[in-house]
Image (cartoon, rainbow, N blue to C red):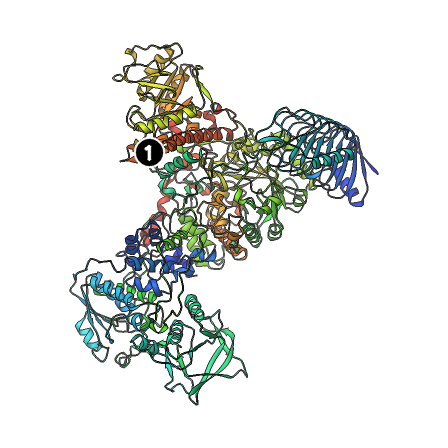
Amino acid sequence: MVTIDLAKIPVREANERIRQYGAEGQDVEVINPDARHHIGVGLTAEINVKIRGSAGYFCAGLTDKVHFEVDNNVGWGLGDNIYNGSVVVGGNAGAIAGVAIRGAELVIRGNMGSRAGQVMKAGTLCCAGNANFMAGYMMYGGRIIILGDSGERVGEDMAGGEIYVGGEVHSLGSDAQIVDVDGAELDDIRAFLDRYELKFKGTFKKVVNAGKNLRYATSERQVRSIPFFTFSGETDYWNAKIQEDLYIKSQIGRYRIRGYGGARELPHLSDLAFKKDLSQSDHGPDPVSKVNMYTEIGGINGATPLKLSMPVMIAPMSYGALSRSTKQAIGMASSLSSIAENTGEGGMSDAQRDAAAQLIFQCLGGRLGWNIYDMKRANGLEIYISQGAKPGFGGQLMAKKVTKELAEIRGIPPGIDLRSPSRHPDILGADDLVIKVEEFREATSYKLPVSVKLGAGRVRDDMKIAVKDGFDFVELDGMQGSTGAGGAEVMEYVGIPTVAAIMEALDALEEIGVRDKMQIVLMGGIRDGIDAAKALCLGSDAVGYGTSTIIAGGCIACMQCHVGQCVTGIATQDPEHEKRYQPAIEAQNIHRFLESVRWQIATVTHALGYTDVKQLNRDDLVALTPEAAAITRLPYEPGYRDRHLELKAKVG
Amino acid sequence: MAVYDINRILVPDAPPEYEDHTAQTNYVPAPCQVACPVGTDAPSYLAYIWEGKFEQAFEAITSTNPFSSICGRVCDAPCEPACRRTDSDGPVQIRNLKRFIMEKVGHQYDPPPIPVSKKQTVGVVGAGPAGLTAAHDLCVAGYEVHVYEMTDRLGGLMIWGIPEFRCPPAVIQEDIDRLTNRCLGLKTHLNTALGDGVTLDQLKERHDAVLLTIGAWWGKRMQIPGESDDRVVDGVSFLRRINGGERPTLPATVVVIGGGDVAMDACRVAKRLPGCKHVKVIYRRGPDEIPARSIELAGAIKEGIEFIYNTQQVAVEPRGMELSLRCVKTELGEPDSDGRRRPVEVTGSEHEIVCGMVIAAVGQKSESDDLDQRGMMLPDRVRADFDGMRTDDPKVFAAGDGAFGGSTIVMAMHHGQRAAYYVKAFLEGRQNPMPYRTPYRTRHVPVAQDLEWEKLPLHEPEFFGLGEKPIDFPEIESTYSYETARREAARCYRCDAETGSADYSVQHREDIFSMARTNPMDHAKLQAMFQRRLRPRQNPFPEGRPAVLDDLTFLPANLSRLVIDPYREACQVSTDIAAKYELAQPFFVTGFDNAPAEVREAVAAGLKASNCGSVGVKAMGESVPWFQLVTPTGAVPSKDATALIFMGEAFESIEIERLFPDQLIGLAVSSLAALERVIPYALEQKFDMLLLDGTANLDGEWPELAGAPDLRILRDAIVILRRLKQEEAIDLVYFGGVRSGTDAAKLIALGAKAVVFGAAVGLAVGGEIVDGNTLRFVSDYSDLDRSQATVNIIKASSGEASMMARCTGKTKLQNLEPEDLRSITLATAQATGIPLAGRH
């Protein structure tokens, strides 16, 4: 047994040592813990750790095969995401004990705080005292044993798993019910209690999901989308789209869901033009060799940056919304073009990891597929706060797509209409977020960049918080971003356009004088190298391509992603449909698209007289519409639009 | 694939005399259309089939194809490999669908005849698909066209080369008749061969221009010893003989040499003739290289024909009563000049195949002594320039197989169309006509709304093979039933059609597709795409666009505010008017005063179930809270009404009295100008609410249908109240153009306490817009359907509104405020006072 004195060394160093002792097979005693956060985070070697005192946030979080004993109390997020092993707490635990655990046994001899076991997938969380409100909130599996009282709204929105309450059930949560406990279950609980020497003589009430909200009662009629020009812009106020919406909503009694991005026109980078007329000059066959495009993202605070051959990344898209083959093809293309890929919500598959040379691992509120091993093999970690297509909403995956295999990787019951939580269990504000970011850094030895994905809303405020919370870069997603499924109205009417988002973000950084303390990857409706070059001129450090890469790989933009039977095998989990997608061929198509993007960015840069993409700046741009001018504060020069017409007239 | 060449990026202009839609913003020709040499608008005819509009489908098919009935049977259908669904679960069966339409209406069609309107005449030599297509186009342009044909029939190889079991003569005749009936200027001279019945000199003298479409009528020789044996015949001659009506008895074993379409037809014909038991096809390359269309190949195999690959004939020798075909095995060597890998003899592989007859289908050639003597022939075809379809003689043009080598019917038609274009230009004296480009049209047919379209599998027609009496040459395949045709048509992706996404419109999508199919070394294509992508879009918000609710968006909560989970967490939607009257949701419904009684009753039942009040001159029913509109000339205030809403400009003179203590009193305001008078008066009189009418026609018939409502009335009312420091003193209820919960949430954020739904509920309960200004209830909704629809639309709207509130971080709908909104157009920013996105 080795002793580590936290009065003498900081947690970061202590964790490094514990990791090392673990690898060497030595057990550890931590003295003077003084409720410090992140003690024992990120351990994956078998080890016994005794904490002589109290621990702070995320004690034993993001671990596997560890056995912790804490003499006194713990802060919130006990055992966050733990796989196997055990954590025994002698005193009380704060909120969200056992958050997102994927196995293991957590025992709290005192009371536990609210939302215990939130989004847990497996394992046992046992509290010998009373629970506070909403124990088992949105849990997907595993069991919670509460020997005392349940607290209010126990089992709120649980999708799976069981909660056994020995004391009083104060109130049941939404979609929860009490059912009978059978003998075998009781025997198993008794055996568990005996193992941890917990005395309990009473009986249990068992709380499970009532199954009322897991699936929509009436399914929405599938219709092929109405072309946007018949309802966007100068069209009838009571147009065909409105009538269709009213018809369908009058049948189902709820908001409509669909896939893809915004249907209607919004101010866009297309409404900007380069001041210099690029339409008449040819810049030779190989502009790429004349321009430096290499870009590093994520290294500003000392992490190993993503090394991009051009200021381009793949936007986060999940395995789930997309088929495994599609994620594989995109990963391959990202490697061929030496840029970074992103897992999106659904966890990381081996195929995806193997295909993508640089892969960002995204963490969402449901912690679906989130785990320490994939964190460690990622090239970047990303906390999803929201996305441009449906800010404020968690991921939405209709039951048709929640196959057995997919459910397994996400750690959820198969066949439910999955509506991921909108918030993280452990991020309720900027101050929690700092601690969460630190936990990730601790777990991965401060090597990986940690980014935040933000749907564009109150960007000015959000950016300032992102800076404060120490992120390495922001993936800023305007409302032109797409999604596999979301509320149709939210896609059209929540958020601000991409071109407005970048302006607000830059304003924010300017206002607090930290432009060099944050990198911005802009995404949402970026379709080619011209859009990218304009985004770079405005001040983005890089851009993200999502939908465009899907289209390059065969998507026909039918906007039926949510249905789950994608005709091209992209947005589907149906093996019969996925068969239609040839990853090797589509990877080449996506790669060629990205190379075409590269050529276009290089040509713009070279034509504007620069040798490096970092030289692109807003003085190179004008605005073609009053809206774009007002948003970007660029000079309004509608005359620049006519250059193309004039040219055509001259040639003709 | 040629579909994605530079012409798809930098689309060349079509000659102006053709109808071509490639310049339209919401259309890009689909890959199938581009792959079709005559530019058939396949997506449109497929969509018409799904809609059951056969005449329209027929028009789309035949408008660029005079041999549509034939093509429906035997076109090599280059559209199908180009079909994007090929890569998924197989191409849409475009050809079979054409066959379905032509079978259905092809014979009924009676086209309006086209008279001769020009003085000049054109002589066309050869009545095959190239010649007749050119003649057709020239006749359509008003010229008199004389077609000289050496046989006794029109049709060329379509008549003489296609066996009846693939295309019955009656089908061919259908196309020919349609063409000759239509083209009054078409004069035919049968049994008149060039050099025999008529010379080129004579033609040049008689006509202002001459087009040579003499075909590739003669089989090439194999150039091997022994082929002069009369048991060795060439494929085209063999087919010609059979199509002429002969049914000879063949030896038991027949060998066909070659892997092209003629070889396929010849082997299948042989198989059907008496005496023939075995047919073997030998081909010098492998099964992956064989040029025959896969469907023909598959048909031949199904009919029991044996294919021997990688085998090359070297000699024919008599062997008693039979023939010995000496062959060697081959393997594939280096690519040839045409890019195909050359078959190379395997040493020591010589062997023989014993048979009774050899049919050599190893290529075709043209012959004309007349042209040869003038030096106009390359040895086996007319020397001509594809760019202008000209021969060395300025007055003489050439097209089709006879000029450019053996090809397909549809390619021959393309040649005919090209040639007709250049002949017309010549006749009109245009020296350097714009290069011909196949025109692409669209008929903008809506996308088939088939719910199964993603799943429907490719449906092959029924294959009959040899049939019961092979010698009768019965047809090998069935025509689709309508049910099958409709399902097959529904499979179409509609690559031509506009998408539902503005940022990924059909133009953007196709550009991305092209980028993904551009070799990174192909500078010309990259450059073309660069120029194309530089072009700015049209301003989507041109001057004069009204301020509309669509152009407001909500600012979501993210880091700076806590988001309220819209899937799970509660958001209070209930509210009240003047703290006296509870609303389960901040909605009212209006507009049903004059609706049919059964509609009124059904909606009333829905309102009752939803605990939702109505606004109207009449009460909806006892159990529905009634906000009575009291007009100057209408009914007197009712004590049954929950609220009395007085209308009219002369409100100051109306005697306003509550008929019971808690009755609400309000004023309806329909004009901006009146606000300055109304608001102080209403405040002074302690009114409970103002009904702000954005339509300016509140008591009219479905006034919202007139267009977007005026949002300024709400803005101005709030400005005035704020100026008077009485913002909370009176509740504002807004009416006008509320279509969804989102619209409602925006109006609430702008300052309304509640909104009134009118036309939206009318449409939800089955109303249909008539003449753009009123609703008629003609649908087959039952009363229950209507009341359920009312409940559902209120529920959905309430859910939507609260979803918006939760996105912005609100747990009460009423807590939405202007600060939660941004405008995306300047007009809307101005009319609502909400700043533009990105501004603050």
Whether residue A530 sits left or right of residue B28 in the image: it is right
In percent of width and height, residue B744 lies at 42, 28
Tag 1's secondary structure?
loop
**Number of labelled discs?**
1
x, y percentage for residue B662? 40, 11
Residue sitting nearer the eye, B538 or A172: A172
Q: Residues within 10 Å of mark 1 (few under 14, many from 20)?
A: many
Residue in the picture at 49% in, 23% down: B815
Describe residue B645's horizontal placement relative to residue B824 as left or right: left
Residue B448 appears in the rendering: yes
Q: Is residue A4 above or below residue A354?
A: above
Residue A419 locus on image (x, y percent): 54, 37
Q: Position of residue B41 (x, y in %)?
A: 33, 55
Residue that badge 1 annotates: B767
| Res B5 visible | no
Chain of residue at mark 1: B
Q: Residue furthest right?
A: A1
Q: Is residue A158 above or below residue B651?
A: below
Q: What's the residue type where badge 1 is placed?
A: Gly
Q: Quadrant of the N terminus of chain B?
A: bottom left
Residue at the outermost bottom position? B320
